[in-house]
């Protein structure tokens, strides 16, 4: 399962979804500490281009996207594409959220929305 974090420095979640300069993307392999990392940089876009669509296309393989803020229409578009947006306080450390998610995934005691994401990935 792929999870992305809107971040300007690669360490903390500190960006609004539509204006994030880059996304740190992690793949959970289902094993203890089985995490693979990559960075996706938002391309320079013309003013007329839809920044939300560009980011959705860039993150289309992700199951979850963490950010500090996201507008209602953008969140709805993410959900329609099968991506679950999560808002967290600015400055939340990516490593803390990775550890929390890894523990949750290994526990097998998942909230219903996350169970659906895991089941979809495993199918």
Image (cartoon, rainbow, N blue to C red):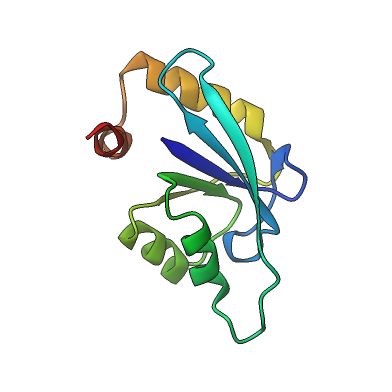
Is the C terminus in the top left, top right, bottom left or bottom right quadrant?
top left
Image-quadrant location for residue 105: top left
Image-quadrant location for residue 42: bottom right
Q: Which residue is drawn at 41% across and 35% down?
A: 1
The residue lying toward the viewer, choosing from 14 and 20, is 20
* In the image, residue 77 above or below residue 10: below
**Percent of width and height locating residue 30:** 40, 20
Residue reaching furthest right?
A: 9
Q: Which residue is drawn at 52% across and 58% down?
A: 58
The residue lying toward the viewer, choosing from 118 and 91, is 118
* In the image, residue 103 above or below residue 70: above
**Percent of width and height locating residue 68:** 61, 52
**Percent of width and height locating residue 66:** 54, 46
Residue reaching furthest left?
A: 123
Q: Residue at x 58, y 57 (%)?
A: 69
* In the image, residue 80 above or below residue 121: below
The residue lying toward the viewer, choosing from 79 and 72, is 79
**Percent of width and height locating residue 61:** 42, 49
């Amino acid at each position: 399962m792929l999870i992305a974090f809107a971040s300007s420095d690669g360490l903390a979640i500190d960006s609004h979804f539509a204006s994030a300069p880059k996304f740190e993307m992690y793949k959970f392999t289902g094993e203890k500490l089985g995490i693979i990392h990559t960075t996706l940089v938002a391309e320079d876009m013309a003013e007329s281009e839809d920044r939300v669509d560009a980011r959705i296309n860039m993150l289309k393989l992700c199951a979850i996207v963490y950010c500090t803020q996201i507008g209602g229409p953008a969140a709805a578009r993410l959900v329609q594409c099968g991506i679950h947006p999560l808002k967290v306080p600015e400055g939340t450390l990516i490593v803390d959220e990775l550890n929390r998610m890894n523990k949750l995934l290994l526990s097998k005691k998942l909230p219903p929305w996350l169970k659906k994401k895991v089941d979809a990935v495993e199918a």
